[in-house]
Image (tube, helix red, strand yellow):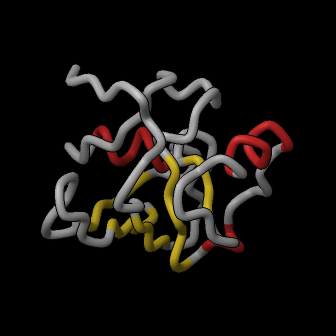
């Protein structure tokens, strides 16, 4: 199991959270399964940037982003070199520290 640490976020995860995840699971799915309500307006189909995260530790262990993800990330709020769409980034066997940006570019935020 791989340790995945989410840094504190004022609304989504105020205290932060560390979870154990099997390799091959996306960061987004891991967050949702752990009760962290990360936005995913396109239902994890790599069609928006609402699940944008910044991988603060362990970024190099992730597979490279595909061109479609890179194109979408160019539109993300607070883009950094270690930015990924959490629906596309799959956990490997190396621990990760992830920050959920303060804002997303989402014209309509819905509660599920």
Tell me which residue sits at (59%, 47%) in the image. 85
All told, the count of numbered labels is 0
Q: Residue at x 48, y 50 (%)?
A: 27
Quarter of the image where the N terminus is located:
bottom left
Extreme residue in the bottom direction: 57
Residue at image position (86%, 43%) is 67
Q: Is residue 93 above or below residue 46?
A: below
On screen, residue 23 versus residue 61, left or right, reads: left
Where is residue 48 drawn, in percent x and y?
58, 32
Tell whether 28 sits left or right of 48: left
To which quarter of the image does residue 10 belong? Answer: bottom left
Q: From the image, which quarter does the C terminus lie in? A: top left
Taking 40 as reference, is 11 left or right? left
Question: What residue is drawn where x is 24% and y is 47%?
Answer: 36
Position in image of residue 58 (x %, y %): 59, 75
Q: Eyeballing the image, is 104 above or below 91?
A: above
Residue 35 x/y as whole percent = 20, 43
Q: Where is residue 9 shown, x and y percent of the image?
A: 25, 64
């Amino acid at each position: 199991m791989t340790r995945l640490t989410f840094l504190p976020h004022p609304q989504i995860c105020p205290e932060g959270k560390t979870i154990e995840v099997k390799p091959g699971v996306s960061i987004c799915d891991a967050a949702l399964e752990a009760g962290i309500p990360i936005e995913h307006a396109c239902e994890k189909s790599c069609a928006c940037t609402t699940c944008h995260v910044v991988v603060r530790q362990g970024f190099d262990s992730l597979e490279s982003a595909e061109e479609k993800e890179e194109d979408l990330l160019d539109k993300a709020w607070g883009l950094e070199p270690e930015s990924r769409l959490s629906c596309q980034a799959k956990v490997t066997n190396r621990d990760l520290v992830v920050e959920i940006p303060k804002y997303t570019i989402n014209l309509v935020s819905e509660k599920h």
